[in-house]
Image (tube, rainbow, N blue to C red):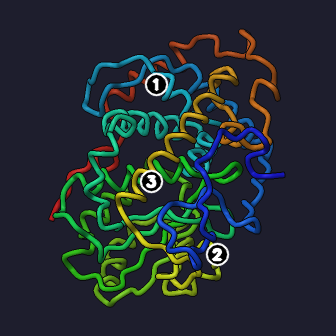
Amino acid sequence: MPLWGGKAPAQAAAPTKPANGSASGPVKTPFPAPDPSAKPAPPSALTAEQETKYRQLLATVSAWTTIPSSNVKGAPTQPITASERMFLTRECLLRYLRAVKWSSTEAPRRLLATLVWRKEYGLEDRPADYVSVENETGKQVILGYDKHARPCIYLRPSMQNTQRSERQLQHLFFMLERVTDVMMPGQDAMAILIDFKNSNNTSNPSVAQGRQTLAVLQGHYPERLGRALITNVPWPVWGFFKLISPFIDPLTREKMKFNEDLRLYVPPSQLWSAMGGDVDFQYEHSVYWPALIAMAAERREAYRQRWVAGGERVGEFEAYLKGGDQKSLTEVEGPPLPDQAPASPAANGDALTKSMSKEVVPPDMTTLRVES
């Protein structure tokens, strides 16, 4: 059965040219789906203790009615939005629990910090036109899926076209959000492919940028990195990685592969020829950018509609929201009952919000200020 399980929204028309673009011109738009051979690894079953911790976290975040408006000490609170509740899926909660080694006290703090960061950083409000200029040279490209059906995002420092600024980081996180939009049912991680060919000290990120990016990735996108494939690494970049290595989580370091054959990780039919694959891809901003934005928006809207149809539940299954064969939470467990909810939402949710409004998270994980 197809990955979309018969529930998919209408997708953009498939290209008339062969998938690898070899006959009727190069590929210029993102692929809509992985190679048929690519399959996500099945999720590990939770232990009884892990299931209990998940249920506790679910009860806590389900009770949240307000969140701080910013990470500033004493910031006023605002009602939690439908979009923020939709963010709190079952898989999202599990990612944060795994990231904090199943700490029942740290997981809700990290989740709330992320909601505040997303609100303050304007991730859902920033228009594509604002960061479009950053991608005019194709320095970041979302194209294809790896052998585990993870969407691939290519980072090419040599194509840097702007001066170091906060907008560069805003562009990166905008693209990471688009990667999550195009993830297939059953897969919640991405593959990052970084090619340093022809890069130089001017185009490469600074150590400060690297630390800031890592802080956000580890703090607000936990467990989202499935694989990092880094190629054509020059000696100065080796020094860069050595400097930032102490700030990289050990589990993240294990996912990083340097100067390896990328065909071992990405099907050649989905891998850009510039990186050793069979895909004759040519970046043309006026074609690629609107195609990516339209595909991501379409899938994001279908995701939202399924969440509404499923009862707007915190803890919803992402595979259901992505259009897979998974039934909705309400179909699996039935509608929530009053006695299943926390007895005192204020005590379980808003009290945590108030305590965290004083210090939501260390500043380097919530505020980005680019340094030279």
Earlier along the polypeptide chain: callout 3 or callout 1? Answer: 3
Q: Secondary structure at mark 1?
A: helix
Q: Are marks 1 and 2 in contact (CB under 8 Å)?
A: no
351 displayed left or right of 331: left
Q: Secondary structure at mark 3?
A: helix
The foreground one among 250 and 310 is 310
Residue 176 image label:
3
Task: State which mark lies toward you, 1 or 2.
Answer: 2
Residue 352 image label:
1
Kind of residue indicated by mark 2: Ser
Kind of residue indicated by mark 1: Leu
Q: Residue at x 66, y 54 (%)?
A: 187
Q: Residues within 10 Å of mark 1 (few under 14, many from 20)?
A: some
Earlier along the polypeptide chain: callout 1 or callout 2? Answer: 2
Task: State which mark lies toward you, 3 or 1.
Answer: 3
Percent position (x, y) of residue 184?
Answer: 65, 51
Q: CA distance from mark 3 to mark 1?
A: 29 Å
Q: Is residue 53 visible?
A: no
Q: Are marks 3 and 1 in contact (CB under 8 Å)?
A: no
Percent position (x, y) of residue 222?
Answer: 51, 52
Q: Residues within 10 Å of mark 2 (few under 14, many from 20)?
A: many
Quadrant that contains the C terminus: bottom left
Kind of residue indicated by mark 3: Leu
The foreground one among 74 and 67 is 67
Q: Residue at x 74, y 38 (%)?
A: 7
Give the labeled residue for mark 2.
Answer: 269
